[in-house]
Image (tube, rainbow, N blue to C red):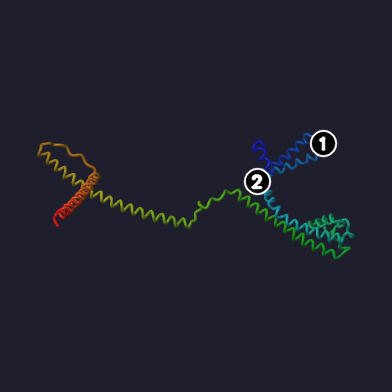
Amino acid sequence: MFAHWPTMFWESGWNWFDFLVVSISLMSLLLEGLPGISTLRLMRAFRVFRLFKRLASLRKIIKALENAIPGCSNAFSIVILVNAIYSILGVEFFSEAEPGFFGTFASAMLTMFQVMTGDSWAQSIARPIIDVYPVASIFFVSYILVANIMLVNVVIAVLLEKMVDGGDDEDESDEPPPLPDCFLVDPDTDDEEEQEVTSDSEKRKSAYRASAEFASQGTQNGNQDSHDQVKSSQSKKSLSSDKHGDVKGPAPPVPACGFHLLNCIVDRLETLQSELNEMKAELSSIELNNSQPT
């Protein structure tokens, strides 16, 4: 109660049972002079049922019995109804021959229950009545067939079915919750997706390889042209230096990518210059045509 607070403590039925057993034990210790205190002390024997809370196997059996009670109640009601019908018939037919067994409805119900359980019903109940009323054998045989063979087995079957279902539910509750559908993988679709991914990756790799080869060829050609230009410029500088008498060391190397970019810029400037010249020529021709008299 201190650990779970009073509201949460009273939500469990086992806690109620523990509280009742402990209270009765304290009353039997404190109030020894009260009459009937020995009867309260006998209630301490129910402390054995506390094991059901501690052991998982016993707790599973109790849970299965709780689940079987609603289903078995219908079968028990049928058994009680059949016993009541045969008890009424027994009081009507055999109350004079055996008033101790069929004198009242209550005694007849107890007698029919004894016959259903098979507790020495033939010698003590059926035989004396059959000696007086031979037709009574049909009464007892039909009751044994209906109650003892059919209905009792129906009750047992329902009880076993409910206990098995309750055990399966308990086992399922111990299992971890299932994964959502988004995490579930179908092996067939997984293989198809893997094949699609591999085919896409192969296509991308081949495209990358082709572009890399093309780029490498372009850079090699640009590097070759730039090296030729560097050599020619160095030779011109050396000749000019020899003429003027200035002897200098070799020029620092220029990166090949820089020369390639420079060549591209020069080519672009030349094309722009040519286009500009063409536009000027066209403009001049248009002006000449406009200046001529009509």
Is 91 on the left-hand or right-hand side of 166?
A: right
Which residue is at a point 65% across and 52% down the rendered structure image? 166
Question: Please, what secondary structure does the residue beneath circle 2 have?
Answer: helix
Q: Quadrant of the C terminus?
A: bottom left
| Residue furthest left as drawn | 243
Q: Nearer the viewer, mark 1 or mark 2?
A: 1
Q: Position of residue 255 (x, y in %)?
A: 24, 43
| Image point (87%, 64%), residue name | 133
| Residue 242 percent across, percent down from the top left | 11, 39
Q: Is residue 19 left or right of residue 229?
A: right
Q: Which mark is residue 56?
A: 2
Crowd around label 1: few <14 · some 14–19 · many ≥20 (10 Å): few
| Residue toward you, 152 or 270 | 270
Give the amino acid type for the residue marked by disc 2 in the picture: Ala
- Image disc number at residue 85: none
Cα–Cα span, label 1 and label 2: 39 Å
Task: Return the residue at label 1.
Answer: 34
Q: Give the left or right position of residue 186, taking residue 237 as reference.
A: right
Q: Say what amino acid the circle numbered 1 marks.
A: Leu
Q: Residues within 10 Å of mark 2 (few under 14, many from 20)?
A: few
